[in-house]
Image: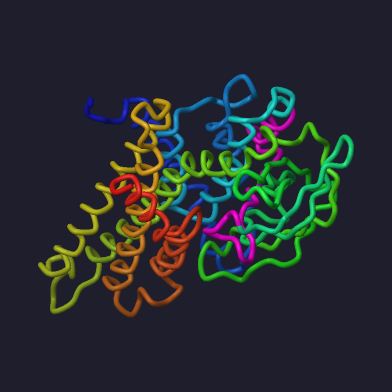
């Protein structure tokens, strides 16, 4: 297997994006987090740089960037504001089923809006009693002539109330287990309602809510793929989105390390910089090693997606990338708080926000316990 490395263009893209985030994204992050407010100005800035277009194929108005380049973008944005990073990520997640299983008419209708930032999308899979156990969902889609009538409630929906399309998984044949789930693209204006928004520990600027579908009529042409294909579509999509959650986690970890390292150089105790103390220097070295290992694993998983999963190991590789990177993010962010001491525990400094934001990366798009199940199944059957 060839050694993986970034191209010169990807390195330059990182440099440009890092400066952009420092100027246009990071300064907004504390305020949006404190107010629990959707980061509209930050998302607008991302649209000016055409970030939402990266993951959309060129024939539908996007840039058709490879997933490694997309991961670089997510990582750098998360380094300044994890909420803004997930705002960019969620529309890609919502549109992946359309890209990979939707009709040409559907692609031409919806993808250009997402690429331009004019439209946003959400992914509606989880329910109150159906998180990791997707097959336990209760949402129903009943065929009625040239439409389906969808009823049910979806939980933990990112961008709830902001998105204008919702990719919804519902049972068309409740007796058929995982083969009875189908996938639909539902427009907000057809009657989608947000029952409530959550008050969260982290990612406070990214709205997460309970979304209600009360007998919404959805045209047959807005079914994604075939009837009964929904479970496969959901798993296929998550395999290809989990590496970018890993990228978000790497960005959070890098942001925490960067701030902590800068603080150690400036803070003095016992007449010299804290950065001179060997115990703290070893902590920083360990943090940097873990981040680099996580970054490399994330890029490796993204490269497998770009290559079309040539060795059939994407499910486990994506699970490894997401699981390892998010565990690293939590550990590094916690260590960053420790390095700042009492100051790290206050909202005056950003490391406590990095720690709060890191936690969700261990939970969403499949808990890290579920990721370990996927990895072990690959190894042990």
- From the viewer's perspective, is 81 left or right of 48? left
Q: Give the residue furthest to the left.
A: 278
Say if the magenta span includes residue 120.
yes
Please report the bounds of the magenta region as a residue range: 109-135
Residue 158 on image: x %, y %: 62, 55
- From the viewer's perspective, is 201 left or right of 289? right
Residue at 76% x, 35% y is: 222
Q: Give the residue furthest to the front.
A: 175
Residue 229 on image: x %, y %: 63, 38
- From the viewer's perspective, is 197 left or right of 218? left
Residue 215 on image: x %, y %: 85, 53
Establish if 216 lies above or below 362.
above
Residues 136 and 277: in front is 136
Work out whether residue 254 can be spotted.
no
Establish if 84 lies above or below 115.
below
Residue at 35% x, 49% y is: 377
Residue 220, by quadrant, is: top right
- From the viewer's perspective, is 31 left or right of 253? right
Residue 369, by quadrant, is: bottom left
Work out whether residue 93 can be spotted.
yes
Say if the magenta span includes residue 304.
no
Residue 7, by quadrant, is: top left
The scheme the figure's colours follow is rainbow
Residue 46 on image: x %, y %: 56, 41
Residue at 41% x, 41% y is: 315
């Amino acid at each position: 297997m060839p050694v993986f490395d970034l191209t010169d263009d990807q390195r330059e893209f990182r440099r440009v994006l890092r400066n952009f985030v420092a100027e246009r994204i990071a300064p907004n992050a504390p305020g949006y987090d404190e107010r629990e407010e959707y980061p509209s100005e930050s998302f607008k800035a991302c649209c000016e740089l055409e970030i939402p277009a990266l993951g959309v194929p060129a024939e539908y108005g996007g840039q058709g960037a490879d997933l490694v380049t997309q991961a670089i973008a997510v990582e750098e944005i998360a380094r300044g504001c994890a909420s803004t990073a997930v705002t960019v990520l969620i529309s890609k997640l919502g549109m992946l089923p359309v890209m990979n299983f939707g009709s040409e008419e559907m692609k031409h209708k919806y993808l250009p809006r997402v690429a331009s930032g004019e439209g946003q999308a959400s992914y509606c899979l989880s329910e109150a009693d159906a998180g990791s156990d997707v097959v336990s969902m209760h949402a129903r889609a009943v065929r009625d002539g040239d439409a389906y009538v969808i009823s049910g409630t979806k939980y933990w929906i990112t961008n709830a109330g902001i998105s204008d399309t919702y990719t919804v998984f519902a049972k068309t044949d409740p007796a058929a287990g995982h083969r009875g789930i189908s996938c639909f693209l539902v427009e907000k204006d057809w009657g989608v309602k947000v029952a409530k928004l959550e008050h969260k520990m982290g990612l406070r600027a990214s709205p997460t809510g309970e979304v209600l579908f009360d007998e919404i009529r959805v045209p047959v042409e807005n079914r994604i793929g075939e009837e009964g294909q929904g479970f496969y579509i959901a798993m296929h999509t998550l395999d290809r989105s989990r590496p970018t959650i890993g990228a978000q986690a790497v960005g959070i970890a890098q942001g925490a390390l960067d701030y902590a390292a800068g603080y150690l150089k400036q803070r003095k105790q016992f007449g010299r910089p804290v950065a001179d103390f060997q115990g703290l220097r070893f902590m920083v070295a360990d943090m940097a090693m873990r981040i680099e290992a996580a970054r490399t694993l994330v890029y490796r998983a993204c490269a497998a997606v770009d290559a079309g999963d040539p060795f059939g190991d994407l499910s486990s590789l994506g699970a490894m990338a997401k699981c390892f990177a998010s565990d690293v993010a939590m550990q590094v962010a916690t260590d960053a708080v420790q390095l700042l001491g009492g100051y790290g525990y206050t909202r005056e400094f950003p490391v406590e926000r990095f720690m709060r934001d890191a936690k969700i990366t261990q939970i969403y798009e499949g808990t890290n316990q579920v990721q370990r199940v996927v990895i072990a199944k690959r190894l042990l059957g």
